[in-house]
Amino acid sequence: MGKASSLTAGLIEPCPVSPDSLKGVPRQQTNPSRWEGEGWESFSRALSEGGIEVKSDRASRSAYATDGGGIAFGPPRGAAIARSAQDVSKVLKAAQSHGVPVTVRGGGLTTEGETVSYGGLQLDMRGMGRVLSIDPKGLTARAEAGIYWHSFAETLRREGLDYLSAPLNMTSSVGGTLGVGGIDINSPRLGCSADQCVSMKVVTPTGDIVECSERENPELFERVLLGYGQFGVIAEATMRIRPYSHIRLHYFYYSSLRCAMEDLVHLARQDASDYLGILTIMDQAVNLLVAFDSPEREREFFSRWAGSLRGYGEAGFTLRMGARYAARPWKFQEALYLYNRKRSLLPDLSPEHHMEGGLIADRTVVFSRAVWKYWGGQQMVIPDLATSEEKFVEAVLRGNEVCRKYFPHYTLYCVGIKLNGRKERYEMSCIPPDALDFAYGCEFEPMLEGNTYSRDYLQSFKNEIYDIGVEMGTSYYRFGGMMKGYIRRAFGDALVDKHLAMKRAADPSMILNPYVIFL
Amino acid sequence: MKNTNYELCNACGVCNLSCPLWRQTRDITITAGGRAMAVKGGAHMDELKPLMKQCALCGACGAVCPMGVDTVGIAIRIRSGLDIDALGKSMPASGAAKKAFFMPGIALRADKRLLERAVSLFGGHRLTEDDAEPLVAAIEGRQELSQSEAVKYMSRLAESAEKLIVAEGLLHRIFKDIFGEGNVVGIGEALLGIESVRGGLRPDDLYIIDSRAFHADFKRLVGYYDSLRRDIGMTMNLDLQRSASASGAAGGVRGIDAGAQARWIIQGRNFRRIVVERVEDIAVFKAVADAEVVHLAEVGGLR
């Protein structure tokens, strides 16, 4: 691969201008020359001879032109659907040989173009979407990694079972999530999805099919989990599962973001609830969400911890807010926005056909549909910060100020992540290096509401959030794709070069997901 | 107002979760979401027509779309070339005395025993002379029909019909535009309104809702069938999103293995009898389930 030879020869040299920065600060070059088509004909012929169809008609290519963020645009030269680990192996072997980049996609819900091909081959893993086995006694299930979490849940539910944690959007894939983390509102108790993985079948960048776990090929296991798709393609995964339960949900309302976050940290430390998170409408209506899988846990919460919370019930909070805005008539528009937002959103969080005796049935469907309906859009901009417990409140308060500066309306979504010691997989991941028992994350999501914002404006907003992370020494959930300019600044050259060396060893032609982290 | 623009799609992929074609093919390009992404990525609508052939037109995608994209309307437009929303606007003003009709659909009309039973249950409804087959065939992409021919057919029906029980769910959205929301019901809802039929349902039934009719009026019917489920205690072919999984047995559908889809629908569910709203589902479920399979019209006694 001609363009890559300069990269394999030594370190990637810093460049004074980065296309993702408007501030003129010297940064790592993030956008070197992309692949321009060399080797494509022989590559696609090799795949075709191997029984793998490569679609290159416009409709097929256009279907993969962007990702969930809707900002990065880069259709593939061709697209192929993986139906087996052997298919993936053939693709990667041919890609190594012919020097063609391969970008892997599961749900495609990245926001920074991490699953956008910019030419090359798009390998769609959703062709591998079956649940292979369920062990109801051992509480594990093995699935092909291209399966949507929701589809995983559909099959598990027929046996009265459920997965542990998954992103709240239904259409992330298991494999994609394991490469990034997988944060749910029960992550303060159960950790991230990647930590719930027992074993995997991985196809390495050179096409070897390898079983790995903490006991078998542990180095590969630790590299691929939270590895942003750099060290292999996950073909199958065995995940821990649990018996399914409806949930009992309660809200506590705050007008102080600081108080809500402090209470969240306190509850997470005490293991006081099964589900815990913060969702805000700007920083005026801060909702601490607490939920339970069982009446026993619910009773214990109300007897031991509820009284110490500084939030209010809905009625009390409404009165306080009414008084607040009555004394500030110039904020009438803001009050109206909050009122209308609450009026439309709250019923969708407890739709009648998902309620069973006051409990929410299939809570991921309910929450996910609300997420898409109220926060989805043609463009999705969701910068985030992932911090240790000590830095959490300050980081979010600073990020909140950035949101206020850029957008009239926005949402913050905060959640904790229980950690199981310091695992090797956490190195250069969304788990901050100084986090011990818990990490905390906050997503800062502007409500674009049909308004048109330039890419520059949105990028400036993201940069200001991420600059907080650099200053405070945090990590991020999304640090690839268009945000990879922050990787060296956040993690330091030594760590990044260590991982780059591992990447080069594993992927000699640098063809697997090349534009996500290192190129 | 129906959203008819693929550009509203936000690429969430939620439509795939309930799509029987997606379930079996895993090919994004032949799903509603894939088509929307293709259009947004630069493909022309004409390029989508070959990709539409296998769509079951079950309507699940449109029912679950959080952005309200009218996936079924767009699909019908691409497949048939018909502007079905314009059909209702071109109907003549009412004049002569109108009656209540029952349009049983081709499959039910062919089953004389079941048809007789249904007609008896529906009392004052006259049987239509035909089942709008040219219109259904056009929507399913099996034959051509011009807009003027479609208008002509609907005008004849509009002159004499006031209320309709229509078995073919694909026609509901067109008929409701013409005859009014409350004047068109599906065969399932019509039969469930009969006490002896509803009373014949059992907690150990697996009830197969006709997906086309259900999704044509999803916001209302999701609550209706949820109440039915709670009242009787039976299970239904509803997925976790509460959309009705289609078997794919409905006429003109290519690309779906109805048997495989039916096996998925019954997987892990406990039942002693299967009750179907759609006649075509009887044979499909009989082939895969070790249980009695009956049409809803056979449940309970005659009035």
Image: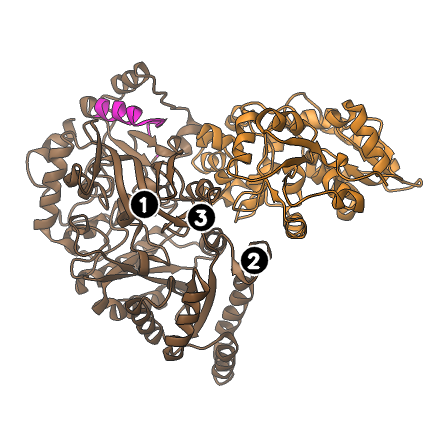
Chain colours: A brown, B orange
The chain identifier of the residue carrying mark 1 reads: A
Question: Is residue B112 toward the left or the right of residue B230 in the image?
Answer: right
Q: Which of A483 and A508 is in front in this view?
A: A508
How many angstroms separate mark 3 from mark 1 (CA)? Answer: 22 Å
Amino acid found under the numbered disc labelled 3: Gln
User: Which badge, 2 or 3, comes first in the chain's sequence?
Assistant: 2
How many angstroms separate mark 2 from mark 1 (CA)? Answer: 30 Å
The residue at which mark 1 appears reads as A177
Which dot, 2 or 1, sits closer to the camera?
2
Q: Nearer the viewer, residue A84 or B296?
A: B296
Q: Give the range drawn in magenta.
A: A75-95
The chain identifier of the residue carrying mark 3 reads: A
Q: Quadrant of the N terminus of chain A?
A: top left
Residue A408 seen in the figure: no
The chain identifier of the residue carrying mark 2 reads: A
Q: Per the image, is A87 magenta?
A: yes
User: Which badge, 2 or 1, comes first in the chain's sequence?
Assistant: 1
Residue sitting at 44 percent across and 32 percent down? B28
In the image, is residue A512 above or below residue A292? above
Residue A139 seen in the figure: yes
Q: Tell me, for residue A356, which label it has, or none.
A: 2
Considering every residue shown, the one lying at the far bottom of the view is: A327
Q: Tell me, for residue A249, which label it has, or none.
A: none
Amino acid found under the numbered disc labelled 2: Glu
Residue sitting at 55 percent across and 27 percent down? B52
Label 1: element kind: helix
The residue at which mark 3 appears reads as A378
How many angstroms separate mark 2 from mark 3 (CA)? Answer: 34 Å
Label 3: element kind: loop
Q: Nearer the viewer, residue B148 or B246?
A: B246
Question: Is residue B157 toward the left or the right of residue B246 in the image?
Answer: right
Q: In which quarter of the image is residue B204?
A: top right
